[in-house]
Image (cartoon, rainbow, N blue to C red):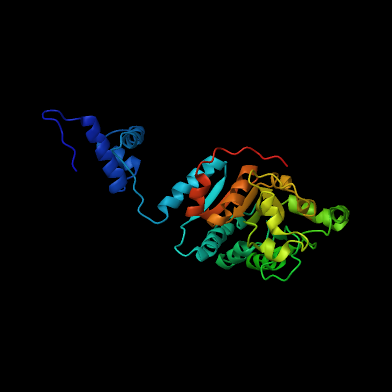
Amino acid sequence: MARRIKIDQIDEEEQLLVRLAWACEVEGLTQAEAAERFGITRLRVNKGLAEARQRGILRVSVDSIYAAAADLEWQLERQYGLSHSVVVPTPENPASVTPLVSAGLGSYLGKVLSDPNLRTFGMSWGNTLNLATRFMQPINRPDLEIVSIMGGVMRGSDVNGYEITTRLADLCNAEHSFFTAPLFAGSAESQAVFMKQDIIKNMLDKIRSCGAVALATGDLSSSLLVRDALPRDIDSRELIAKGGVGDIIGHVLDASGGLLDHVVNQRVIGVSLEDLHNIPNVILAAGGLHKVPVIRAALRRCFVNSLVTDEQTARALLQGEDAPAPAGA
């Protein structure tokens, strides 16, 4: 509805703001061109547009299915202290969440891996990361090394870290290396023996030197960890009963982001969650409401720099959540 003006009273200042807004936002004039048209300085144009926005004269409406996602990205970054976030639309079919999140991750990884300053990149494993490589365009980075950052699974899986690392390296024309150890040792004592071996220590040092790593996560009901990697003497129901919500690189977290008080966390062969704090860009890709507790736990621990998720999951993560404080080990 058009605004009614008072008789014999013309607000020349508001008229100018409207004309500036129309010229720059509708006609597409630059601020310099608008300054010339209206006989004012570029500084006056800049301040005029800012005032038009402040007074509600100029409003921006983004009509796209991605508009809500852009707003959620900004909220996630502000609320959780993230450097970057990617939010994809949530599909009607829940089974399509992982492929869409994977597509978002694939697009983001293309930008990350194209950075010439990045020399070592760490890759975890899981369905999301596996599919992400299928959404990436080939790049030429012979100076880059792709490193698997988790040990192998005990039972057969088509989404293990070795295959994903090899596929990503091929896409980037890059070098690659494997973390050749099981994810879990048979006991806390044997884990200590593994961690003292030179080949393991050298590989862990290489992982710690990564400029960026990509992680996935899952809950403790039907994740890849539960299906293919958890030691046979560990029951996932026991972990859930003790308060476990999911895992990050094999480490089982509680809802606060702390390590679950369970012997399984003493058997992980790999880098610690504390090591992740020293990696410049830790990318976590996960979607689906069933993963909200473990994603939130990871965000609360404050080692995640970039998050890739879907709209519905993002909204759930933002509900009733204050700024996170680092969780204890």
User: Does residue 207 sit above or below 161 in this rendering?
Assistant: above
Left or right of residue 245, residue 267 in this image: right
In the rendered image, the quadrant that contains the C terminus is top right
Q: Residue furthest top?
A: 9
The residue depicted at 57 percent of the width and 45 percent of the height is 83
309, 171: nearer the viewer:
309
181, 37: nearer the viewer:
181
Left or right of residue 178, residue 325 in this image: left
Q: Whole-percent x and y of residue 60?
A: 34, 45
264, 180: nearer the viewer:
264
Q: Residue furthest left?
A: 7
For the question of whether residue 119 can be seen, the reply is no
Find residue 227 and report its image quarter: bottom right
Left or right of residue 71, residue 15 in this image: left
Q: Whole-percent x and y of residue 80?
A: 56, 42
For the question of whether residue 60 can be seen, the reply is yes
The residue depicted at 64 percent of the width and 64 percent of the height is 172
The residue depicted at 74 percent of the width and 69 percent of the height is 155
**Tag count:** 0
In the rendered image, the quadrant that contains the N terminus is top left
Q: Whole-percent x and y of residue 13?
A: 24, 30
Q: Whole-percent x and y of residue 28?
A: 31, 48
Find residue 225 and report its image quarter: bottom right
206, 221: nearer the viewer:
221
